Image (cartoon, helix red, strand yellow):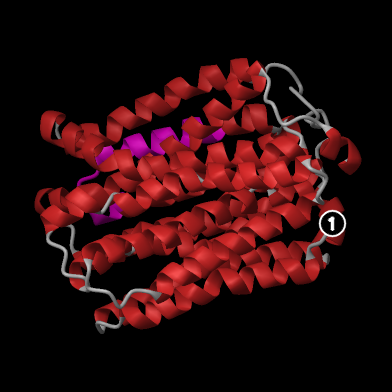
Amino acid sequence: MGETHRRSKGALSGGQWFVIILLFALTLLNYLHRQILSLLVPVLREKIGLTPVEYAGAINAFLLAYAVMYTGSGVVLDRVGTRLGLAFFVIAWSLASALHAAIYGFWGLVLFRVLLGVFEPGAWTGGVKTVAERFSAVQRGLATGIFCSGSAIATAIAPPLIVFLSLRFGWRMAFAVPSLVGLCWVPFWLRATGQPALAGGSASAPTVALGELKPFLLDRRVLAYMLARFFGDSSGYFFMFWLPDYLVTTKHFSFAMLGALGWIPYLVNDVAPIAGGYASGKLVERGHPVIFSRELLMTVGAVFVAGGALFQASSSVWLILASLSASTFGVGVWAGNLHSLPGDAFPTRVVATLYGMAGSAGAVGGLVFNSLVGYFSSHGNYHAAFIMLALLEPVGVAALWAWLRD
């Protein structure tokens, strides 16, 4: 199968473009829903008396549910398939997000964040399984890059959209309206995936029995991928959760500067998954081994992340933004290939489960790293956080080079 994949052409068919555009919209909606709360925190402090400690508790409730159900969603999708499985998860998380419009206190918020954390991982396990089923090895890098870039673009469009909805229609409608858009996505998905497979995949492969997973759980290739996620996912979480605070508290950006310039590193991150996925796909098309090509580009991404992280001493606004943009570019290149690897390395029938297990490892790593960043930032020591950031992806890709090979 690997040789057939290497000889296949990289051009996408019309049906494949339909699927990948829907997967792009999937991750965009996924990240948009999870960002609504963070953007409305100032309003909720006034409206329902939400304290900073309670907000942190709500975030942790989401992340814990997310970590557990990353594996759980993979098991579900390998059992029921991506067509119906993704439709279910999108409906479920859209309804969970809409329920936030009914909150009147802390415990209601925690309950609905847990529900959101239970259902949102299905976007990623289902998306990766879909790419493995419906795209060849040459195509997967570009397809995954487009798929992943939806989450990056969501970080750019969420602030103006959610603030507009809140100011124009009230904060409760800021939760409700994006949920309606998520529900509208489902019929398009069911139409796009009516055929068993669009190209070179194995969407009709039998579902896996749980007992079949045991050999994979003892496979060091799976362990290597889980380690890459445990360390590498935290780099993305850092820029999602901590970059604005870092620019304001350490680099002394005003709130106006943050609004005017803080989007630049995220914009660079938008294009990086596509560039990284396309580059690895071209290497495969030219005859290089598939996994080698992904890991080579992930190594390039790790170098960019580390380089940008270690050059934070400047006081120049543009040098600060340039170095941070180098890091976010590296995060994007890494992601565009990281999410392609399961489809290259593992059988399609178990790819969602194994990817979900690794995603759970990444979420646990994110909890650990975020706790450390919170400690260091509270003591005014972002320097230590950036040193850790510089080491995360090199450690993760080292495990891949050691144990996950073609």
Q: Is residue 113 left or right of residue 47?
A: right
Side of 294 where 271 appears, left or right = left
Q: Within the magenta stretch, is there residue 5? A: no
- Quarter in which the C terminus is drawn: bottom right
Task: Confirm whether residue 195 shows in the render.
Answer: yes
Q: Is residue 340 above or below residue 334?
A: above
Q: Where residue 236 sits: x, y (%)?
A: 46, 59
231 and 308: which is toward the camera? 308
Q: Secondary structure at mark 1?
A: loop
Quarter where residue 380 is shown: bottom left
What amino acid does circle 1 point to? Asp
Determine whether, in the image, residue 123 is placed left or right of residue 384: right
The residue that appears at 48% across and 74% down in the rendered structure is: 390
- What residue appears at the point 38 percent right and 40 percent down from the top-left corner? 154
Residue 87 falls in which quadrant of the image?
top right
Please tell me whether residue 189 is drawn above or below residue 102 in the rendered image: above
| Dominant secondary structure (helix, strand or loop) of the stretch shown in magenta | helix
Classify mark 1: residues with Cα within 10 Å, few (<14), some (14-19) or many (20+).
few
